[in-house]
Amino acid sequence: MNGKPTPAMMRKVVIASVLGNAFEWFDFAIYGLFAVMIAKLFFPSGNDFASMLLTLATFGVGFAVRPLGGVLLGLYGDRVGRKKALSLTIVLMSVGTGMIGLLPTYAAIGIAAPILMVLARLIQGFSVGGEFSGATTMLVEFAPANRRGFFGSFQMCSQALAFSIGALVAWLLTVNLAPHDLESWGWRLPFLLGILIGPVGWLIRSQVDESPEFLAYASEVRHGKVKAVNTPLRTVFREYPRAVLGSIGITVVGTVSAYVFVFFLPIFAKKQLGLSAADVNLSTLVSTAIILVCCPLAGYLSDRYGRKAVLLPAIVAYGIASYVLFRQFVNAPSFGSLLAVQIGVSCFMSFFWGPTPIVLTEVFPVSVRSTGAAVTYNLAVLIFGGLAPFVNTWLVHATGSNLAPVYYVQASVVIGLVGVLALPVAARAKPAGLRFDQPT
């Protein structure tokens, strides 16, 4: 493909990126939604708290290999193209998810069950490590220069869509199956559904062209107009340190918001505060649907008024709302107060989630864009995201205070604000001269 992409191809790219990414994140999300049941079936220890910690640690294991997957798949995408890298990630995710759906429990095969669960999570983590940068880079490089924030926001829409579908499936299974049936076979259904991700996702992504911006760069390399970057990872850290620091800071506040309010809070509400699984899943469904709707608006506003003009007030408002509403929920736990905290927080989360994909990609040039976005995103997620459910569960137990998680959130808010302020004034990526503090 040469020149400007057609509207039809642009639609295909959006659909391929959003649906493929949603398929991947759906599989990641349902592990968290069924964490309580997985703890009982795969990590029995005679102690509910210890079993839950082991389950959440296994959830975090998937994040341990995400930087590796992000770097290797990012390098692959920068060398051979975005399209091939995205097709590979979706096949890997279907393998890891299918394993979880088919695994015998601890009662059937003993210690092999948790070992195989960890292996499945490692495969999932490696895959999703390359998904964010690949899908985001594809969206941004196809988008018109003045609408890249809007199109990039669909990456976050796909994550919200995955969380919404996961919560919907969990809610439907919870209200329609007897507890015994849900525990014996019902929880496996969404994981088995994930096996379809490989062929369906690969088929969807095989229908799109390669990114025109990447093709232009590859052509310049072939004709000797520019030199290929042989060490993109070193180049990212050596030549773009401010972009790296800013990107990591923004990712920290975003990833903590996701893994505290979408993953940890449902577990906390069920195990610590005694709310029903049906109520918790329904509340999560409503809140993630709000993120799905609001993210494109946030991306559009960042195109119109500038990235920082949207990010800064959104993070400040989120910090205030999360503190006030979480305290109210802990002091008077109910379906209504849970709904209030998840809806209130989700509204403000949307407005820093939406611009995040474009910020993480436009600070790097096309030659190292996929690698740069992958390494900054996955480093932040590894340290602050994947272990957030584990750390917060331990904090609540160790301190005896149900308010402990909100202080973890506030720390991420400070890091996020520092990240926004650290962003370079002018993006290094095309289009030249794009500014974070002015409208595009």
Image: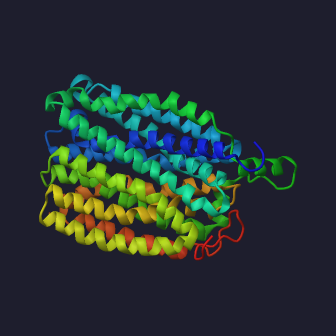
Q: Give the residue at x 45% y 40%.
A: 24
Q: Residue furthest top?
A: 108
Q: Nearer the viewer, residue 143 or 377?
A: 143
Quadrant position of residue 31 = top left
**Side of 8 relative to 357 (left or right):** right
Point out residue 164 in the picture as x, y percentages from the top left corner.
Answer: 35, 46
Q: How many marks?
A: 0
Point out residue 362 in the picture as x, y percentages from the top left corner.
Answer: 62, 62
Q: Give the residue at x 29% y 52%.
A: 286
Q: Give the residue at x 55% y 59%.
A: 150
**Side of 247 relative to 293 (left or right):** right
Viewport quadrant of the C terminus: bottom right
Q: Nearer the viewer, residue 11 or 84?
A: 11
Q: Nearer the viewer, residue 433 or 371?
A: 433
| Viewer can see residue 357 | yes
Quadrant position of residue 315 = bottom left
In the image, residue 196 sits, relative to residue 83, either above or below, namely above
Q: Residue furthest front?
A: 7
Viewport quadrant of the N terminus: top right
Point out residue 4 in the picture as x, y percentages from the top left corner.
Answer: 74, 50
Point out residue 221 in the picture as x, y percentages from the top left corner.
Answer: 82, 50
In the image, residue 104 sits, relative to residue 248, either above or below, namely above
Colour logic: rainbow
| Viewer can see residue 388 | no
